[in-house]
Image (cartoon, rainbow, N blue to C red):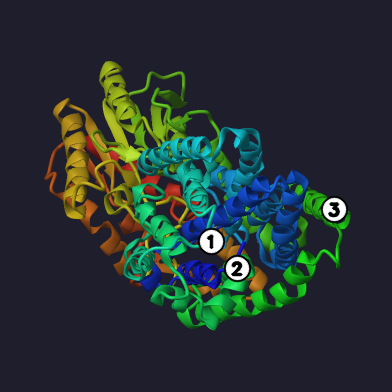
Amino acid sequence: MQYRREIDGLRTLAVIPVILFHAGFQAFGGGFVGVDVFFVISGYLITSIIVAELKDHNFSLLRFYERRARRILPALFVVMLACIPFAWLWFMPSDAVDFSNSLIAVSLFSSNILFWRESGYFATANELKPLLHTWSLAVEEQYYVLFPIFLMLTWKLGKKWIASILLFVLFASLFAAQWGALNKPTPTFYLLPTRSWELLIGAMTAFYLADRNVREFHAKIDQSISMVGLLLIVYSVIAFDRQTPFPGFYALLPTVGAALIILFATHRTYVGQLLGSKIFVGIGLISYSAYLWHQPLFAFAKYRSLKEPDSLLMLGLSFASIFLAYLTWKYIETPCRNRESFNRRQVFVMSLCGTLLFSLGGLLGNQSDGFKNRLSQAQRNVIDIAESHAKMWETGGCDVKGGESEIKGCIRGDKSKQPQYAIWGDSYASALVWELEKSFASGGKSFFQYTKYRCPASVDVKILPPEGCEQYAQKVLADIYLKNISTVIVSSFWQFYVEGDDFDNGEGGRGARQIQAAALKDSFSLPQDVRKDNILRAYQKTVSDLLSKGKTVVLIYPIPEVGFDVPIFYAKSLGFGDANFSKDISTKFERVIDRNRNVNVAFDELGEHQNLIRIRPEKVLCDTTIKGRCAVQLDGKQLYFDGNHLSNDGARLVIDEVMKAIERSQVH
């Protein structure tokens, strides 16, 4: 193949937006599309090489995988090795376990599957995972396990038949991605079946150019269409953001843009001259290593800092990733690609040894609970308490998970008594259950537990994921009416479903970022204010319906969010020597008020009703111990077991208010 400088320049157009996006610069809100551009480039280059060798009857599967090993593994192994000491020094046990698992998955090119599976409710925040970005390498390598074999088996059919088959797969994958972006966003983002169409765009481009390196068009056509390709990519980087459904039809803009540049940009076009300039080509040559280095640098910096690193530091780390990339390209990548330095046998032996060693290290980290004993006793105590609270939430078998919609309605408290009470909600309600059970059991009462994570105590709220919320809510209401329950306690993450994004505490911390923004079915067809109004009216309707049926409703208003993981923050501060942590850990009350305002107003609009009991957690958690702040610890006890769920100690404060209110209502 004739070398094309503009292709290396296109790599720069892919990697720089990715780096600046992960650095947090808002102007590059769609910088993640750089990965999609990489997919197109990779699909084009690899297909071009395979097709050229098949035409010359010179293709070797062994040689193909040797080239992939030389290209991918040396730099990857260096970056993985560099991550280990920092993870050992700084990571808390749960994060160390996650990192250990990623070492195994990256070594086996299955990290995309791991990060898809880890995207659960209490998973480590994605931006703190040093090897998160390797998901794209896994997608490519999974693709290249299948693609060369497919071409070998179908080559005799002719390029037209092969192109027709690939075109069919491309469109099937694209439409699956569009459906998945709206209905199953996490697996759609990470997995090969919904990403392969992007690689296939590059492959189809290669088939089109199979008999020529650059298609000859009229100069004006080359100029115009290559410029369109550039604008499509730039527009995507600027206009897209985290809320953009991806990788569905929106991903056509950067991928088609990349294909148009490959097809029409030449040394005679302005775009080709720009991308073929020394600086673009230079960064493009080291783009793979730059991509590898940037995420670990950002992740460890954010983890080590007790507050969000400022823009200046993130910009400095962006430049550092380029500098490290140059060193890696010069002293690792280039020598390892030289067949005179390492022969095929040595490459495969070193690849196998690296895979086994990293997998073994990851296995040890997993089995040792993240080498928990390396922490101080004080740190272990903090983490143990939080983990015990989290496990209590997860155990009991009463919480409905996933796409299930069947109710369980477990009886809690004094099970010898027929329940007249129920608690209904999502994980916020689940976090209250154990303390509620203590109070009810001591008073000789029992209650039904109706909880399903990520599903609010409301009808007519369409939330994805998980599926089944609407059906579950209807079944809960039917069961409450059937069993003639007199009092229903409702609690949910009300504010999140309404606002649809993470809580920003105004001091460098954003919510757990463990819940990716709610994918509401009507989010993409309705203006945001209309969507919010629909959800708030649904909340009001649910409470009103319960009241109209003669039920007493204990309505727990929004529980304040924190903006950081409390026990992890506390344990980190102990390890990093922050003596002031125990004095000033809290969240601005004004930020909590702003966050919860829409929900609070909607609940207040329900008006006075003799059977409506209002519980306001803000009154017991905020503006009490510290003026203008919301407490996250009290008398040395942590009130949260993560960034927004109350621990048993925190739940106790709310449940005490619930029990007092119920007693007062019964007296009257």
| Nearer-N-terminus badge (3/1) | 1
Q: Check disc 2 and give the amino acid type.
A: Tyr
Q: Are marks 3 and 1 in contact (CB under 8 Å)?
A: no
Left or right side of 470 for 341: right
Q: Dot 2: within a 10 Å radius of its alpha carbon, few (fewer than 14), some, or many (20 or more) residues?
A: few
Of residue 617 and residue 311, the one placed in the foreground of this image is 311
User: Looking at the image, which is closer to me, 341 or 498?
Assistant: 341
Residue 257 position, x and y percent, is: 39, 60
Q: Which residue is mark 3?
A: 353
Determine whether the residue tagged by mark 1 lies in a helix, strand or loop. Answer: loop
Report the residue marked by disc 1. Answer: 213
In front: 511, or 209?
209
Would you place residue 27 above or below residue 61 in this image? Answer: below
Which residue does the numbered mark 2 point to in the structure image? 3
Whole-number angstrom distance, CA of label 1 to CA of label 2: 9 Å
Q: Quadrant of the C terminus?
A: top left
* Left or right for 73, reference 548: right
Above/below status of 466 relative to 325: above
Q: Quick check: marks 1 and 2 in contact, CB under 8 Å? A: no
Mark toward the viewer: 3 or 1:
1
Residue beneath the point at 40% across and 60% down: 260
Q: Residues within 10 Å of mark 3 (few under 14, many from 20)?
A: few
The residue shown at (45%, 73%) is: 272
